[in-house]
Amino acid sequence: MTVKLYLESIEAAYARTFDAQVVAIDGNSIVLDRTLFYPLGGGQYWDTGVLSGPNGDINVQEVRGRGDVQHTVETEHQLVVGDEVRGTVDWDTRYAHMRMHTAQHLMSGIAYELFNGVRTVGNQIHAEKSRIDFNPISFDEAMMERLVDVVNGHINTGLKVSDSVMTREEINTIMPPDRTNMNLLPASVRDLRVVQIGDQVDLCPCAGTHVSNTSELGRVELIGKKSKGKGTQRLSYHLLTPSFVRSPSSKIV
């Protein structure tokens, strides 16, 4: 199983360079013993970047898998099992996903509090724009304006974003199970990585990458609303560039 370096802490997501060893190859799919590349999952798209090996640089085009993380690279890679490589994550894409995913958590938590426990039933995190599906609800303009105003207020406050490991029971004593979508997680998983914004402004099990402070989000703007049937509405959003932007860590992990 590939060690997911980005899960070690919130700060670990700011690292972009790491050393690893090739442990398996299947055509142009490379499995490493450890990685900073985030694989597709949880609504968040994969990281891209470069693997530098004995024969030069190869582009990482796609990343998938939750056990063994598979890095899809250019076909003519010439790597063999046992090779040492240095991976470099594309920072612009990684940081965009971090900001978007944290904004999604914040909006989902605030919507739950403002609108009678409305649930987040789906999301897609992209670099340029993202979306959240809410149910049951029918947003009008005033409701959307209120949601954005409260979310941006928390962004301006500069809330700390932290992570920890909790049991299902510990999470359920803090947040209602319907708010954290606990029913969607396998019952066999007892210990969960939890991402928290501020003093429980939002708390949710999540294996994604996030920023360390809401001040890095800039400002949320809604760019679309669409009915998805059966009481579900989809809000699309993007983020304006903040005045404070974090740089990646220069440390090689």
Image (cartoon, helix red, strand yellow):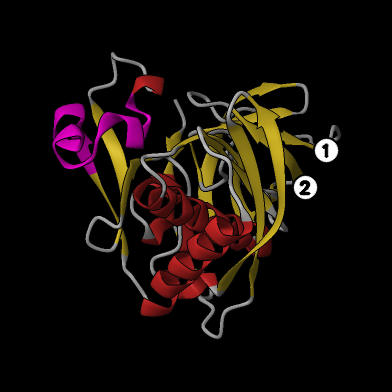
Q: Nearer the viewer, residue 245 or 152?
A: 152
Q: Is residue 244 above or below residue 170?
A: below
Q: Which quadrant of the rendered structure holds the C terminus?
A: bottom left
| Residue pointed to by mark 1 | 74
* Circle count: 2
In-image side of 86 versus 180 (left or right): right
Q: Which quadrant of the rendered structure holds the N terminus?
A: top left
Q: Nearer the viewer, residue 6 or 221?
A: 221
| Classed neighbour count for the residue bearing mark 1: other residues with Cα under 10 Å, few (<14), some (14–19), many (≥20) | some
On residue 59, which mark appears?
2
**89 in magenta:** no
Q: Amino acid at mark 1?
A: Glu
Quadrant of res 70: top right
Which is nearer the N-term, disc 2 or disc 1?
2
Q: Residue at x 57, y 79 (%)?
A: 242
Q: Is residue 190 above or below residue 17?
A: above
Q: CA distance from mark 2 to mark 1?
A: 6 Å
Q: Position of residue 232 (x, y in %)?
A: 59, 32
Q: Residue at x 49, y 60 (%)?
A: 147
| Residues shaded magenta | 165-182
Q: Main secondary structure of the magenta part?
A: helix
Quadrant of res 226: top right
Q: Is residue 46 visible?
A: no
Report helix, strand or loop for mark 2: strand
Q: Residue at x 23, y 40 (%)?
A: 175
Do the CB atoms of the residues marked 2 and 1 lie less than 8 Å apart? yes
Report helix, strand or loop for mark 1: loop
In-image side of 250 versus 9 (left or right): right
Q: Is residue 146 above or below residue 241?
A: above
Q: Is residue 200 visible?
A: yes
Q: Position of residue 16 (x, y in %)?
A: 55, 60
**173 in magenta:** yes
